[in-house]
Image: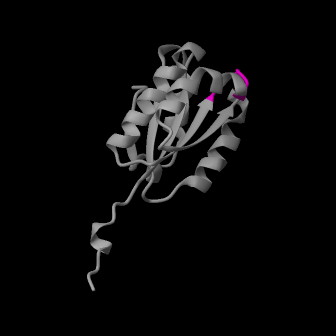
Amino acid sequence: MFDYSFMSITYRPIIVISSTRPENIPDLIKYVFRSSRASSGKKVYLHFITDIPFHEFTSYAREPLLDNIDLGVEIFTWKEDEIEKMMKVIQEEFSDNVGIIFYCDEEKRNIIKKISQSIPNSYKVNLVKDMCK
């Protein structure tokens, strides 16, 4: 009998905190999935800060989501005044093996910058990419 446990691949969940203009959502989704795959991610928790309703977000994201159907994804849309609530949800998702990605466009940079500066250092250690610098 052989022990194949050494051959198992550990997949890393990725938490994405992002905010862009609605027309940039497809590019965001493509980038997130590409980055997730590059860092061995199979599950993405996408936290998107926006004023548009969830169904409108999914209509913008539909095509890239369907192109990457093999990846698990949970999408949360938050209003700007719900950031504390979002952080509580992220704390529930967080583990030592999770990766974090920050993504924004020029218009929404300040929102994501505030969040990235306020998260604990223990989270920052797991930073995969910060596209808001």
Q: Which image quadrant: the C terminus?
A: top left
Outermost residue on the front side: it is: 1
Left or right placement of residue 117 versus residue 47 in this view: left
Where in the figure is residue 78, as x and y percent of width and height? 68, 32
Q: Quadrant of residue 76?
A: top right
Residue 84 higher or lower than 106, as above or below: below
Identity of the residue drawn at 59% across and 37% down: 47
Residue closer to the observer: 66 or 107: 66
Outermost residue on the bottom side: it is: 1
Residue 64 higher or lower than 128, as above or below: above
Overall secondary structure of the magenta section: loop
Residues in magenta, as a range: 49-54
Residue closer to the observer: 41 or 128: 41
Identity of the residue drawn at 37% across and 60% down: 10
Residue closer to the observer: 24 or 118: 24
Where in the figure is residue 59, as x and y percent of width and height? 64, 22
Left or right placement of residue 56 versus residue 4 in this view: right
Res 104 seen here: no
Identity of the residue drawn at 44% across and 59% down: 96
Q: Quadrant of residue 5?
A: bottom left
Identity of the residue drawn at 49% across and 36% down: 116
Q: Quadrant of residue 52?
A: top right
Q: Is residue 4 magenta?
A: no
Left or right placement of residue 9 versus residue 72 in this view: left
